[in-house]
Image: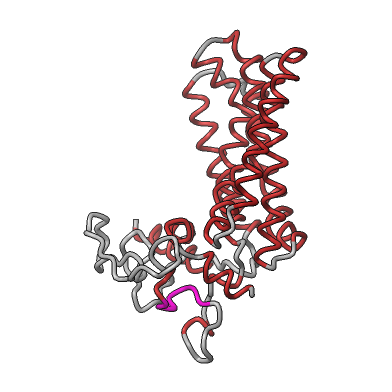
Amino acid sequence: MKNELIKQVCVGIHCHEQPEQLHATLDSLRRHTAAPSINVKLILLPDGPDPRHVMTYECPTIAGMMNQGYDCGSDDYFNVAPAGGSYLATHWNLYDNAFLFLKMGYASAMAWVLFLIVLGPRFVAWWIGPEFEEPSGVVLQILMASSLIFLPVRAVAQPLMMGIGKPRAVTLACLGAGISNLVLSMILARPWGLAGVAVGTAIPNIVFSVYVLLVTCRELGVGFLQFLNYVVPRAALGAVPSLALLIWFKVGMDVQNLVGLVIAGMAMLALYAVTWILFVYRDDPYVDLTPVLVRLRAAWGRA
């Protein structure tokens, strides 16, 4: 049953773009290219580093699927049951963890969410006026806190449910979240003002995200605790150094202008990347960053 679900899940533009963001192309692939994209039969790029190459579509439309079939059966990086001795029987297979994407989504969301939680109010003060730092900043912080769980689920788990042809639960949850948002915002706006409206939005977002995660885990046969154990602990601990750095920029350096905010953001991203490479993804069972680091070191040596 799980095999059939994953076969249906990994179709369409979502499941092409997500692994493309993971740079899932391996050097050993027969279709490997220097072009900055995954090079599979879904979208085949001619050999060469020029991103302006015209794309050609080789994969026919598969009946009942959202779009072109995922990997077109090429076995370049995805197969639910690779044959013994085949490429994916001995190399990394995207099927090994359907929720690998959510860890990546959590990573990308957490970086800019942390920045907006800590220094977002300062940006508002610079952009609009100092008098808006506290009232508007609180609203921003509340919404960004809920986005830590909402954005990865909305970007990954929801499309997965759509891909397997089971949009009903997600649609009803989305409708319920919208109604709850309206009702809670109306109730909380009177005592808390705009902050109450933000809380009225954040609570339904969190409830929606948890529900969709539970439903998606059940449909894919992935244990919810298994998912949490893989995605959350190291990612949360890995965010601590970046959070501390941002707080230092805010409290210690008292960043107020755009230049200071840009410097803080660049420093945070650099530390964030190093932390994720050296700690969050260290000994990861599904992602081996060693080849990437070797190529980066070689490129640095040639520079």
Coloration mode:
secondary structure
- Residue 240 lies, in percent from the top left, at 70, 43
Q: For residue 223, which quarter of the picture?
A: bottom right
- Residue 185 lies, in percent from the top left, at 69, 22
Instruction: Answer above or below: position of 95 versus 169.
Output: below
- Residue 118 lies, in percent from the top left, at 64, 29
Residue 78 located within the stretch drawn in magenta:
yes
Image quarter in which the N terminus is found: bottom right
Residue under the image location 55 percent in, 62 percent down = 164
Q: Which residues are magenta?
A: 73-79
Q: For residue 271, which quarter of the picture?
A: top right
Q: Is residue 4 left or right of residue 232?
A: left
* Nearest to the observer: residue 126 or residue 271: 126
Residue under the image location 34 percent in, 60 percent down = 302
Q: Does the image show residue 28?
A: no
Instruction: Answer above or below: position of 207 versus 81.
Output: above
Image quarter in which the C terminus is found: bottom left
Residue 110 located within the stretch drawn in magenta:
no
Q: Does the image show residue 24?
A: yes
Residue under the image location 62 percent in, 36 percent down = 114
Instruction: Answer above or below: position of 123 versus 65.
Output: above
Q: Is residue 54 left or right of residue 231?
A: left
- Residue 64 lies, in percent from the top left, at 45, 66
Outermost residue toward the top in this view: 131
Instruction: Answer above or below: position of 195 versus 219.
Output: above
Dominant SS in magenta: loop
* Nearest to the observer: residue 56 or residue 52: 56
